[in-house]
Image (cartoon, grey):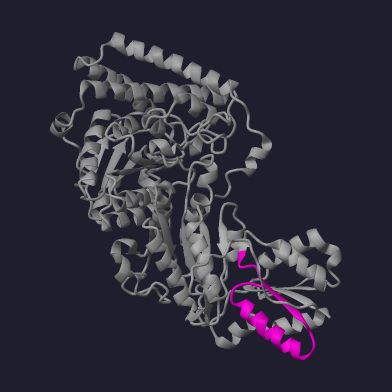
Amino acid sequence: MSNIFYKEAVRDALREEMRRDERVFLLGLDIGRFGGTYKATDGLVDEFGEERVRDTPLSEAAIAGAAVGSAMTGLRPVAEIMYIDFTTIAMDQIVNQAAKLRYMSGGQAHIPVVFRTQEGAGRSSAAQHAQSLEAWFAHIPGLKVALPSTPFDAKGLLKTAVRDDGPVMFIEHKLLYNSRGEVPEQEYLIPFGQANICREGSDVTVVALSRMVLRALEAAAELEREGISVEVIDPRTVAPLDIETIVKSVEKTGRLVVAHEAYERCGMGAEIATQVMERGLYFLEKPVRRVCGRNVPVPFAPVMENYVIPGAAEIVKAVKELL
Amino acid sequence: MAGQPVCAAARELSAPTPDLMRSIHLTMVRIRRFEERAVELFMAQELPGFLHSCLGQEAVPAGACAALRDTDYITSTHRGHGHVIAKGLRLDRMMAELYGRTTGYCKGKGGSMHIADFSKGILGANGIVGGGIPIAAGAALSAKMRQSGQVSVAFFGDGAASQGSFHESVNMAAVWALPAIFVCENNQYAVSTHGSRQRVIPDVAARAAGYGIPGVTVDGNDPLAVYAAMVEAVERARGGHGPSFVECRTYKWLGHYVGDPGKYRPAEEVAQWKAADPLPRYERELAARGVLSPEESELVHAQVAREIEEAVEFARLSPHPKPEDALEDVVA
């Protein structure tokens, strides 16, 4: 095992896949010489050159479209959209084109494209650089959506994403790039649709996404000191969603908290709660609780941002209220 | 450069062989008869959905695709039947797609606006105005990176030239010197809004200068003028010299969709363009050149008429998809 940064895990995955398959290439603003805004692609241009680590004009729609068009014609692009907030400009290409052309062409189109982007609050970036929009993409048939919370998951999921024959939204978290974790020396892949039980417990199930997984683990550690046993589940991909693992856990605990930074309204928490109720309503001893971003734009001032985006304390509180 | 019409000499110099001229004619007749029949069938409520007819615009796809190879890529539009016929699709499987049958090019999942055939380089007609342009740039990028020698053509209308996707894609293709050709079918109206209310410059092709690429405006009702401009653009693209812009002036005879009375257009304007019908005009030219006599032309029309009726028969007799087929082809 080696202990590496999350951003290194992303980079290692890209490097390994680019060495393995010459059809894989990267494109995006500032990813080459500059190394990416969060340095995830730092140094790759030195090994693979400017053709395969391609700096682009500042044109999200064209970046996404160039990725879709090249994916349809034999290449395997990994397009970086610097902030998930900027996918709004590329939305037609992601949602109407990448996600649907396979279907609309009666299965002819193969669109092996990865849209790498990052989301999340916590840096006083205000409302256009701090959203968590995974639910938008999970809503769209034809897209797969991965949200790695650790270096291990980032590497294993990204390699799977690159090898997937359809479009994948690969959503990193801006405050995780400098987090560290253990990663095996030998090659590995993590299949989509396989949740990770990060911590076993028996009293309450907490399903958390992206960086909230870390907050959930902090909360679980704190609650353990009070004799409360929390099971923390990271779905890792929300499309496909491993609902089986979640329902099985709820069958054991009878209590469910869903935690994410994304706005509460119509977030993944709503979907997960509904699916749990459809499959296991009678396992639930208490109503499902959501610990989510408040339904306001993410504010700038740290004191307000902290208020809007939940942390471990809110998870602890929600868990206790269910007992 | 921008706004300059293809001069008569250039048109003559790059004139296609008699065989190719006849093949362009056949393509125009096939598009014309296919569209006429599709309109009839739609009005008779045999076809579901809605239909955007390219009647009157046949010379653009016929001339443009004559300059392409089978392996070259195109992206098309909501008004795309002409492009895909010109790129070599079978009328029966197209008609079956319009009927929503399993034998259609997209197994009934796409319909009129989404006909695609990857084996013919057709990366899909597209229901989003301007949606296919970035994809064509991407296919051009792929051709360049794979050093395949292919070129990629984005067909789009004058309305799409007001979309950000157009500007972003042309710029990107220029910066990377991609083997792309941007073919603007200027049929004068973005849905109902005239070009004069879309932009303050008369020629869309003038925009090419802003991206540092060649742009020409040609008579889009003259297939040989379109062909001549395309030959030059294709040569430039294949030679590694980057993209070109070709604006083809034409006119959509019907409204935006079949059933749109098009009252936003002066009746005289419509009558004028219909009088300047590109098909008989081209037939007169071919007769004058001794390439195709009126009698031979008649035979082509008769042959195509049979082909169309066979296509309709094929579509009508083709099986409907099973409802649950809707669940297939969603993810890889």
Residue A81 visible to the viewer: yes
| Residue A10 percent coordinates (x, y) | 46, 71
Horizontal placement of B60 versus A106: left or right?
A: left
Q: Please name whichever residue, B106 or B229, is drawn nearer the observer in this view of the structure.
A: B106
Give above or below for B133 relative to B64.
below
| Residue A54 percent coordinates (x, y) | 33, 63
Q: Residue at x 43, y 40 (%)?
A: B77
| Residue B328 percent coordinates (x, y) | 61, 43
Instruction: Name, please, the residue furthest toward the front.
Output: A186
Q: Please name whichever residue, A241 or B67, is drawn nearer the observer in this view of the structure.
A: A241
Horizontal placement of B216 versus A301: left or right?
A: left
Give above or below for B107 relative to A317.
above
Give above or below for B296 relative to B233.
above
Instruction: Name, please, the residue furthest toward the top.
Output: B295
Q: Residue at x 46, y 76 (%)?
A: A7
Residue B215 visible to the viewer: no
Give above or below for B99 relative to B217.
above
Which segment did they paint magenta?
Answer: A208-237
| Residue B30 percent coordinates (x, y) | 40, 22
Q: Please name whichever residue, A227 or B180, is drawn nearer the observer in this view of the structure.
A: A227
Where, by quadrant of the figure, is residue A43 drawn?
bottom left
How many dots with numbers?
A: 0
Could you tell me which quadrant the C terminus of chain A lies in? bottom right
Residue A212 belongs to magenta span = yes
Residue A62 belongs to magenta span = no
Q: Residue at x 17, y 31 (%)?
A: B14
